[in-house]
Structure formats: C-alpha cells, structure tokens
Image (spheres, rainbow, N blue to C red):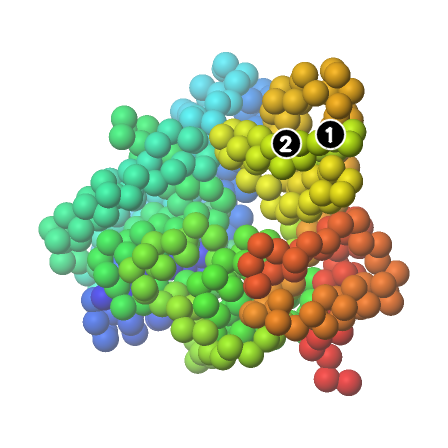
Amino acid sequence: MKVLKFGGTSIGTPAQIRTALDIIADSASKGRIAVVVSALSGVTDRLIEMANRAAAKDMTYLDLLDRLEARHIKYAQTLIGKENRETAINDLRSLIKELKNLLRGVSLLRHLTPKTLDRILSIGERLSVIIISHSLKSGHIAAEALDARRIIVTDETFGAARVKLDKTYSSIRACFRACSALQVVTGYIAASVNGNTTTLGRSGSDYTAALIGAALNATAIEIWTDVNGVLSADPRKVPEAFTLPYLTYEEAREMSQFGAKVIFPPALRPAIDRNIPILIRNTFQPDSRGTIINNHPQSKKSTVMGFSSLNGITLIRVKGNGMPDGVGIMGRLFHILAKEKINPLFISLAPGDHAVRFAVKTEETQKARAVVEKEFALEIQANMMETIKAENNLSIIAVVGRNMSRLPAISGRVFNALGRNGIKIVAATQGSSERNISIVVNQKDETKAVRSLHDAFFSRT
Ligand code: ADP
Ligand code: ASP
Ligand code: MG
C-alpha cells in the first residue's frame, strides 16, 4: 500500500489534473493505493479572502464565490465523462450553497471566528475530491471521495488543530478495512471529538497523507508537487538550486521548519514513527527520481546540504542588569515560553552579558512579550532587568547540513560569504544540533543572503 498526495500546485488546471490522473492510474495498476488531494491551486487563499470580505461587509465576496463555482464546474465539465458529470456537478453546487450560507452568516454578523473560518476552508478540499474521484471513475477506476473529517480526529485549536493519534489511526484503519474502492481523501481538514470541522494548518495535506500512510503501514508516502524534490534552496529565491536525492528525516525537518514549503514539518512525525520513506516527486516530470527522505544517512561526511529561510521574524531581547542568578532566569524564561506554547525559532545566549535573544514569528511578538513581562514584572520593577526589547523585519537563514560541528571552517565560510556581500548579521547561532547553523539578517537582505551562501558553497566556478 502506498499513499499519493497531490498538492494544489499539481492540480491548478484541467491539463495538470489529467497528468495527476495518469500518475494515479499507473500507480493503482501496480498495487493498492490511497490518494490525498489539496484544494485546487489558489483556492484556500481565495476562501480566506472571501471570508475576510464577508466579515467586512464587502459584498464583492459574492463575485469571488461566483468565480470559484464557475471554475470548479468548468473543470468538472472538462474532465468528467457524461455518466458521472451530472452527479458531480450537483455535488459541487450543493457545497457552493453551503459555502454561500456560511459566508452570508459571516457578513450578517460582521464577524469571522476561527471556527467558522475552518468550516469555510474545508470546502476547498471537499470540492477538489469530487472532481478527482469522478474523473478517475470516468477513466474506469473505482474511486470514492472520502471526507477526512470521518477519519482524522483533532482538538479544537481551529486553524492549527492537534491530531489525536490513537483515535485517528484506529478510525483510518476501520474505514479502509471497510472499503475496496480507491479512496480520494480530502487533505488538510479534520474534525474534533465534538464533530466540529478543523484544519491542520496551511500546507496540512502533507500531514493527512502521512497520517494515512502511518495508520495503514504504507510502503511509501509520495508527495507529488511542482518541483523535482527537496532542493538545495527555495528555487524562487535561488534559480540554481538543485535536487537533493536523499535526506534523513531530521535533515528534511531542518529544511522545512525554516521555510522549505515543499514538506509540512508535522508530516515527518508519523513517517518517522513507522519508518516509512517519504518521496517528493514532480507531477510534471514523473520520470525524475525526486528526493527520498528516510532514516539512512548517505554518508557521515561533514557537509552543507542546503539553505532555508523564513521572513517575518522578530527578535526579542531579555537582559539582566548584572543579576547573579542568570541560570535561574533562563530556566524561568524557557519554562514560561514552553508553557504558553511559544516555540522560539532561534535562541542566542550571551551569559557574560546576562542576555538572551530569541526569535518568534512577528505575529507572536505581542503574546511572547506579554508573557515575558508578566513573568519578570518584579525584576523589571526593581531595575534588576532591562525592559524587554523587540526588533522586527528580520529573517532567519538556516544552513542545513550534517556533522557540521566537526568542521568549524563551515561557520567561517558562512560569515565570510555574508560579509563579502555586505550583509549585516544581526545574530547567529550554531543550532542545538549538528545539522543547523542559524543566522538572523534584516528581511530586506534575505534573498541576497541565501543566494550568496548558495553561491559560496555550491558554485562550480
Ligand atoms: P503543493 O501545492 O504541492 O503542496 P507547495 O507550494 O506547498 O506545493 O510546495 C512546493 C513549493 O515549495 C515549490 O514550488 C517551491 O517553490 C517551494 N520550496 C521552497 N523551498 C524549497 C526547497 N528547498 N525545495 C523545494 N521546494 C521548495
Ligand atoms: N489547501 C491547503 C493550503 O493551501 C492545504 C494544502 O495545500 O496542503 O494550505
Ligand atoms: Mg504544500
């Protein structure tokens, strides 16, 4: 059994969908498979836009809705044979009606809750599975649409729900045991124990595929997308980036946590737990081998493998005024951040200076700052600690490699490359593992920094 997941980038036009259908048909002819699909390309963004317009009582959300409906119906007419077309179009129309009602409610109340937004977003994937499953049927493949709200169970953190693994695995198994047709599953969406619709976070369809793969003990989880695998850098920033044929789960995690969108970081966990390889493949170049992610490092040699970057970063500084108990302060700081579920993306300690700097996504700044200020209110009042400072408009660049601490020259080369290209280093740290060196730069320098590093390490001239 294999799981194949097709992202929005693989299903952006009817011609692209045909290519994806050929890949599915070929795989299905070789053994049992399950298919996971995202919403058609751009649809999740459009749904968010519609919901925001409705909440602002901007009635042009109705125009967007009409366009969304027309696009799906056109795709159905182009791809689905006569015998299934009417049923499919009726199903699409009834979902559009559900969406219209939800948006009308938002516009009447002038209010959009995360819970309602998740219900609205669920429509994207529910629409796309109708098109894909009926198109497969038209190609004589017994396929069925499966709404993942029946099999993936989460808490109620709307927008980024946490999966209840045991319940999820047992309902996936029960569901697949009971069916023989090829299941075309909605990525990204799930339901809480109370039956409310939730979503797994943007790009969450990869996670859906990994959960199904783990539950069914698949031989592989194939992520079909629009690039030839995990590349040495984001190809939109570094056109020379090349495919990495093999990565370990940990290396893939470092790349993806710091911005390589090609795989959603939580998707690695279920695969690691069951030791299932993840293959990243290009829908539009199915003959290229892509990237294989598993737990076998190809070599122990110290190497830099690639570069990732994340923008919209804020650096928060907590600094004592020569207080004696620096260690206690750090302990309290990290404890309170963990308790409030704030996950620093970067930490740099300057014990001599009694200072810590940590990075968060800019949208988390207010929360992080409030949490720290509350924890250290007495110290700040007693002037034992400086007021908390936050610096915005930053990016983190991650240099991802293996056994990097064995080769101190790597850091030197990194700093040299940035210095030579006039890029100011705001902060830097050798990550907690040997797989990561993180550098904070001004956001305006991000692309130049990644290019300079890629060039310094990989240029053949
Ligand atoms: P999908 O719709 O298939 O899920 P995504 O847009 O989520 O596709 O992910 C694929 C995109 O990830 C690529 O088009 C590429 O621009 C981007 N990307 C960023 N960094 C990397 C990287 N290091 N390797 C490959 N792709 C990357
Ligand atoms: N459709 C969702 C998104 O755009 C989930 C996914 O593509 O994986 O984020
Ligand atoms: Mg994706």
Q: What residue type is labelled 2?
A: Ile
52 and 68: which is toward the camera: 52
Residue at horizontal 29%, vertical 60%? 274
Q: Does the residue labelled 2 lie within 8 Å of ligand 1?
A: no
Q: Are marks 2 and 1 in contact (CB under 8 Å)?
A: yes
Q: Looking at the rendering, in which quadrant would you find the N terminus?
A: bottom left
Q: Mark 2 points at which residue?
A: 329
Quarter of the C terminus within the rendering: bottom right
Q: Is residue 84 visible?
A: no
Residue under pointer 1: 323
**Left or right position of 252 against 240:** left
How far is disc 2 from disc 1 in space, using C-alphas? Answer: 9 Å
Residue drawn at x 35%, y 70% is 22
Name of the residue lying farthest toward the left = 178
First in residue order: circle 2 vs circle 1? 1
Task: Place residue 96 in its image quadrant.
Answer: top left
Provide residue 217's location: percent of width, then percent of height.
23, 61
Mark seen at residue 255? none
Q: Position of residue 116 (x, y in %)?
A: 43, 26
Task: Tell me residue 151's x, y (percent).
Answer: 25, 43
Q: What element carries label 2?
A: helix
